[in-house]
Image (cartoon, helix red, strand yellow):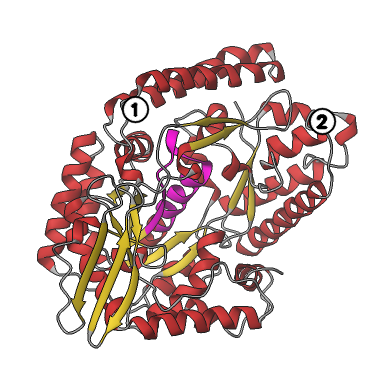
């Protein structure tokens, strides 16, 4: 056991004791149906009616501009004041990794469960473009038919640390060159297919490439591109009515600037409780995800008006004044903000203020009554430090609900699994496929106990193989190394999750874009256990 997220998982999967769970998380749902019930035991969040109508107008315009304003989106916009279930992710080139599709489908499934329980929560996805430019945003990795090594595609000539909302989508030469690279990579894997499958596979790949090209051409910024890639799939192809939130919209920033006020008025209390939570995690012999807060902590970054660089502020207090100071490393401009705790007004700076990781959800709470946040392992770990601290300063956070980490099948994985040298290393066996069958049947027939047993058994099988394969080191061209890379995303020592390592369109090249999100959606039910590891046997 390494992180507090392991305790979160074990409480759900093994029913183990977690005495401090209420302190760190408030409540932990065992199933997605339970999550809806627990969410409506949380304090109600009332959003100012004028502000809510303004938000609806902004979002209606954003979706209409991109052509993803469907009747279902309109219906959901009229319901958001009653509550939302939210997911979010950094804006990454080509739409990012598979976890985004998984998060969206999980949020929609929870929304549908809530509607059946007559406690409707609207599905919302936050497009995070306020983070600074970094490799996770400007790079994707693709599988390599010849070895375990990945093939990276970069959006180069960007300055690290500048806000991602500055990325334009007007480099058509870059786009076309890299679409050709993606086409060639997928073509190399045709040798794993039966000849009768060539045509269908090629059509699906070309469909994806056309989709990526046209969504890029129709957009102006990376924010638009991400909204189109996922909005078309969720709202046009599937008619789910997912509402997309552009995190860097200037008008939204103006409305959410007041979210920082509790952090400024109660800065020391927040820092102390964050550090107390960090200490309590360490006392459990677990590794805190992030470091303690220092006395110069600021709850926001300041985007330089000249170049968009996210300036880190140092904060100090002078009697009843809070003073922020920072310097942009690009244009060398120095910035300073001074506010009085008794009369905090950030409106003059609002469009340049962007939240930190720990204040992002608090910012959203000022415009969206959020009761469930769909989260990955990192968010579950990190927010165990944040939730006690925001509670201390009077902010109500949502229920954090973990999606299942999903692995999937492809023809090249299936082919290499038949290599005799991999017999004891691959997932595939009659027992493995029997477990998938039991899981599917239990989900379909609402057999809760059988579903939980099969889900836990599947997780154990996957974890067992991951542990085994991590202990094996071979040359990149060795079949074991290629299997590790293709099936589990282990193209280096730092990666072990297929849907994190590879972009979303790898799985979609097999399922087809029309069934991609739906494949994730079908995996979940009201009785599905929160978190864990699952598998989708994707077929052409």
Residue at image location 54% in from the left, 71% down from the top: 291
Residue at image location 41% in from the left, 55% down from the top: 87
Q: Quadrant of residue 181?
A: top right
- Residue identifier under label 1: 216
Q: Position of residue 214 (x, y in %)?
A: 34, 23
* Magenta stretch: includes residue 109: yes
Residue at image location 29% in from the left, 82% down from the top: 317
Sequence order check: which comes first, mark 2 or mark 1? 1
Q: Residues within 10 Å of mark 1 (few under 14, many from 20)?
A: many
Q: Can residue 120 be seen at all in this image of the molecule?
A: no
Q: Element under label 1?
A: helix
Between 174 and 111, the residue placed more toward the observer is 174
* Magenta stretch: includes residue 330: no
Number of the label disc, if any, that sits on residue 479: 2
Q: Residues within 10 Å of mark 2 (few under 14, many from 20)?
A: some
Q: Element under label 2?
A: helix
Q: Quadrant of residue 421?
A: top right
Between 468 and 291, the residue placed more toward the observer is 291
Q: Can residue 126 be seen at all in this image of the molecule?
A: yes
Spatial separation of the CA atoms under disc 2 and disc 1: 36 Å
Main SS of the magenta segment? helix
Q: Position of residue 253 (x, y in %)?
A: 21, 58
Check the picture and name the quadrant holding the C terminus: top right
Residue at image location 45% in from the left, 42% down from the top: 137
Q: Position of residue 389 (x, y in %)?
A: 42, 80
């Amino acid at each position: 056991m390494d992180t507090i997220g392991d305790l979160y998982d074990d409480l759900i999967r093994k029913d183990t004791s977690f005495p401090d769970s209420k302190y760190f998380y408030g409540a932990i749902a065992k199933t997605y149906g339970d999550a809806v019930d627990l969410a409506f035991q949380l304090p109600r969040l009332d959003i100012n009616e004028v502000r809510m109508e303004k938000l609806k107008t902004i979002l209606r315009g954003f979706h209409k501009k991109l052509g993803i304003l469907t009747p279902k989106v309109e219906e959901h916009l009229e319901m958001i004041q009653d509550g939302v279930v939210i997911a979010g992710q950094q804006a990454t080139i080509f739409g990012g990794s598979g976890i985004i599709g998984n998060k969206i489908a999980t949020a929609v499934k929870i929304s549908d469960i809530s509607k059946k329980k007559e406690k409707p929560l609207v599905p919302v996805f936050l497009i995070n473009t306020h983070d600074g430019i970094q490799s996770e945003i400007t790079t994707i990795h693709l599988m390599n038919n010849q070895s375990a090594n990945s093939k990276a595609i970069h959006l180069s000539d960007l300055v690290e640390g500048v806000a991602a909302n500055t990325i334009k989508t007007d480099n058509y030469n870059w786009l076309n060159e890299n679409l050709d690279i993606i086409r060639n990579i997928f073509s190399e894997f045709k040798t794993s297919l039966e000849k009768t499958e060539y045509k269908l596979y090629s059509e699906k790949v070309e469909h994806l490439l056309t989709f990526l090209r046209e969504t890029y051409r129709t957009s102006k910024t990376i924010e638009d591109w991400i909204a189109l890639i996922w909005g078309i799939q969720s709202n046009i192809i599937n008619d789910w009515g997912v509402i997309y939130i552009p995190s860097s919209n200037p008008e939204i920033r103006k409305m959410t600037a007041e979210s920082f006020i509790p952090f400024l008025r109660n800065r020391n209390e927040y820092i102390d409780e964050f550090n107390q939570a960090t200490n309590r995690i360490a006392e459990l012999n677990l590794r805190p995800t992030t470091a303690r807060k220092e006395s110069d902590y600021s709850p926001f970054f300041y985007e330089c008006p000249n170049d968009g660089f996210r300036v880190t502020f140092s904060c100090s207090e002078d009697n009843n004044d809070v003073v922020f100071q920072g310097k942009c490393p690009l244009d060398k401009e120095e910035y300073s903000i001074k506010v009085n705790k008794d009369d905090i007004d950030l409106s003059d700076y609002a469009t340049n203020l962007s939240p930190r990781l720990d204040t992002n959800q608090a910012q959203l709470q000022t415009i969206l009554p959020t009761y469930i946040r769909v989260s990955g392992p990192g968010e579950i770990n990190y927010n165990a430090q944040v939730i006690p601290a925001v509670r201390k300063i009077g902010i109500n956070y949502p229920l954090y609900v973990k999606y299942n980490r999903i692995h999937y099948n492809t023809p090249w994985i299936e082919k290499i699994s038949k290599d005799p040298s991999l017999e004891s290393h691959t997932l595939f066996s009659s027992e493995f496929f029997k477990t998938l069958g039991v899981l599917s049947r239990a989900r379909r027939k609402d057999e809760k106990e059988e579903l939980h047993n099969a889900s836990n058994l599947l997780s154990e099988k996957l974890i067992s193989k991951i542990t085994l394969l991590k202990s094996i080191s071979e040359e990149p061209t060795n079949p074991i190394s290629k299997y590790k890379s293709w099936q589990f995303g282990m193209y280096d020592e730092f990666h072990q999750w297929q849907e994190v390592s590879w972009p979303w369109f790898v799985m979609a090249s097999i399922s087809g874009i029309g069934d991609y999100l739906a494949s994730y959606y079908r995996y979940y039910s009201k009785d599905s256990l929160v978190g864990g590891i699952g598998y989708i046997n994707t077929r052409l």
